[in-house]
Amino acid sequence: METFQGVKLWKADCESTMEHTENQVYKMVVQLTRPRKILQLCSLSTDSMDMLYDYLPEDGCLVTSEFEKFSYECPAKERKLQKRKGTKEEILKELAALGEQYDMVFIDATEENPINYYNLIMSGNMLRMNGVICVQNASTSSQEGIDDETGFMSKEMTDVIKADARVEQVKLPSGCGIFIGRRIPLPQTSPPLKGIVEDDVFRGFGGLGILDRLRLDGKVAYVTGGGQGIGRAFGHALGEAGAKVTIVDMDLQKAEAVAHELHMKGINSVAMAADISKEEDVKRVVDAIVANWGRIDIACNNAGINMNSASEDTTLEEWDKTFNVNLRGLFICCQAAGRVMLSQGYGKIINTASMASLIVPHPQKQLAYNTSKAGVVKLTQTLGTEWIDRGVRVNCISPGIVDTPLIHSEALKPLVKRWLADIPAGCLAQVTDLQAAVVYLASEASDYMTGHNLVIDGGQSLW
């Protein structure tokens, strides 16, 4: 009896260990892929289900056929759960007819008709490009080592996926029989597929899909004015896309705080203090970046100031201070970084202008600021045409009124209501609204664009 109890205990411990391993494997895959939509066609442990709910974004969903097994009273989890009734084949056909696609699919190799389910998923394009399929109870044995129907079914299912050129696979040595596959772009075929134009559009330019072309892996970038607001958002965006980032700001403490944020996210980052209106400061920054990382691929010249005053009251000191940073300093940065890029034969310069280069924002009075930002656009256009044939593209971004701590001062609060009335979007821009633009302009996907002023203002400059 004691021996029997001991065997039961060992078996329970083994099952518990396997469930823990399964949960850890799925947790790692979910963290790496960040799925938004998940299709679950097999039983998962409660821990695994809880983990999936926790990592799904607020607008994510988990479609499950296990509608009786899992029911949550937690409203946040219930919102993410989409229960489907019917056989798994019926559910798949219904979802395929709706054109549904998923970032992650769970399937069991030992259930009835798993190959049929797999074929429905793939033929119906239900697994997105780069989407992941997780197969439970995948075979680990050769044909000779299988002596039961379940084993043969698992082996057959596993072999079907292994033979599918649309899926890149890895068998994990976890002891749980977990098989992970990722849908990849079509492999090179020989001879070419009949009726298919196998050009860069079909295969991807340089063999890369559009999202991969936006990656900045291995690139070296700097962001001036990176210690707060728009510059901070630009630094995070470039770093998340794969670049090494130097955060430059007059306030070293602010620059270090942002560099630390990037470091916590696994991004190579450095903080430097500099006044970009001083040529020697800009040269020191550029020289340090080249000495540290060997090159500069992306120059994000974002630092700027705004000093409001009526035109008749604008002093030469205020005018000069505004132009020294917004235009003179930006020119110094463009020239210093441009010389490095021209010697490399490639580079991207992204300047921060403003919608004030297109219209006269009101009711605030900011003659020096408006004029300096118009100068940024013209400088960008001129450099863009001069340098593109030597591999350097120069563009600028013109944000509308951005909701940063700077506009929440007591002096500006009364103006916010007026600004909102002038914006078709009905709201101020968030710094996150600008991040994709800086990544696009920094990437090889925008290589044919130069001298462009990319306006992101919620439509304000159209009225």
Image (cartoon, helix red, strand yellow):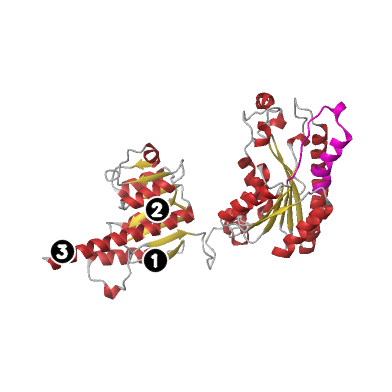
Q: Nearer the viewer, mark 3 or mark 2?
A: 3
**Residue occupied by mark 3:** 5
The answer to whether one can see residue 95 in this image is: yes
Compared with 351, 160 (above or below) is below
Residue in the foreground of this view, choosing between 84 and 34: 34
Q: Quadrant of the N terminus?
A: bottom left
**Residue occupied by mark 2:** 105
Task: Of the two numbered discs 1 and 3 on the same chain, state the one appearing first in sequence.
Answer: 3
Compared with 430, 29 (above or below) is below
The answer to whether one can see residue 130 in this image is: no
Residue 96 placed where, x, y %?
A: 40, 47
Report, in whole angstroms, how far the alpha carbon at label 1 lies from the one at label 3.
31 Å
Mainly helix, strand or loop, the magenta region? helix
Answer whether labels 1 and 2 touch (C-beta < 8 Å): no
**Residue occupied by mark 1:** 172
Q: Amino acid at mark 2?
A: Val
Residue 309 placed where, x, y %?
A: 81, 29
